Amino acid sequence: MRFLLFFLCLTVGFFSCNQSSEYTSEVKKINSLLEQVADAKKEFDEIPHKEINSRLESIKSTIKFVEEASGGEIDKNNGLLLDSYRGVKSVVKRFGKRTSQMKVEFGRTKSQLENFKQALLESASHDKNNSQIDEAYVKLNMKKEEEAASTLISSVEELKARGIRFIKQNDEKSAALAPYLNSLK
């Protein structure tokens, strides 16, 4: 009887070890994705959010100032300069909304990856929705998680590039508009 109990424990032990290592490559990939998402978060945090938001507010206040100071009468050349200056906002369209959505997405993506990794490491049989975790499930969800992380990372890269371009164009358009603004003071 002792031998049978020992053999049963040994078999369960081997089976458990085999199960947890069954998805070793997926766990490694999830670890890599977690690192990439963490790096993207650092890059996101380095974007000059305050400066961009301040410049967007400055565009609004400058337009308001021109409308009040000129009484609605602007010659064609200065109107074109003002329109060009205002148009720079489109480079970072919906900046505040996008950044707040991305902050939420960082948390969600990290949580999803960590939960998926934990389920694989523990050889869970079902997820929290009671879906069976089998090879097809793992393959499908790995693809979804890779796509979500990739989309988030590329969104950060795009936002950073747009932020840099916005600041540069804002400087150029502000310098071109400065003589007209000085004439209104």
Image (cartoon, helix red, strand yellow):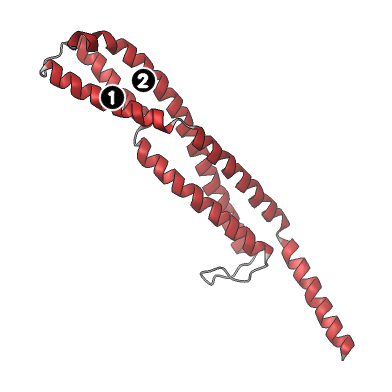
Local secondary structure at mark 1: helix
Of the pair 89 and 71, the residue shown nearer to us: 71
Q: Report the residue at 43% width, 23% height from top.
A: 165
Q: Earlier in the sequence, mark 1 or mark 2?
A: 1
The relative height of residue 2 versus residue 154 in the rendered view (above or below) is below
Q: Residue at x 41, y 22 (%)?
A: 167
Q: Which residue is mark 2?
A: 170
Pointer 1 and pointer 2: residues touching (CB < 8 Å)? Answer: yes
Is label 2 in a helix, a strand or a loop?
helix
The x and y percentages for residue 157 are 51, 34
Q: Quadrant of residue 123?
A: bottom right
Under mark 1, the amino acid is: Ile
Foreground: 16 or 143? 16
The residue singled out by tag 1 in the image is 59
Left or right of 167 in this view: 147: right
Q: Specify whether residue 140 is in view.
A: no
Q: Estimate the spatial distance between the alpha carbons at disc 1 and disc 2, rounded to whole Å.
A: 9 Å
Q: Position of residue 23 (x, y in %)?
A: 70, 59
Residue 29: x percent and y percent? 66, 50
Q: Quadrant of residue 56?
A: top left
Residue at 28 percent across and 12 percent down: it is 177
Count residues near mark 2 (Cα–Cα under 10 Å), then give few for <14, some for 14-19, many for 20+: many
Q: Is residue 6 above or below residue 85?
A: below
Quadrant location of the N terminus in the rendered image: bottom right
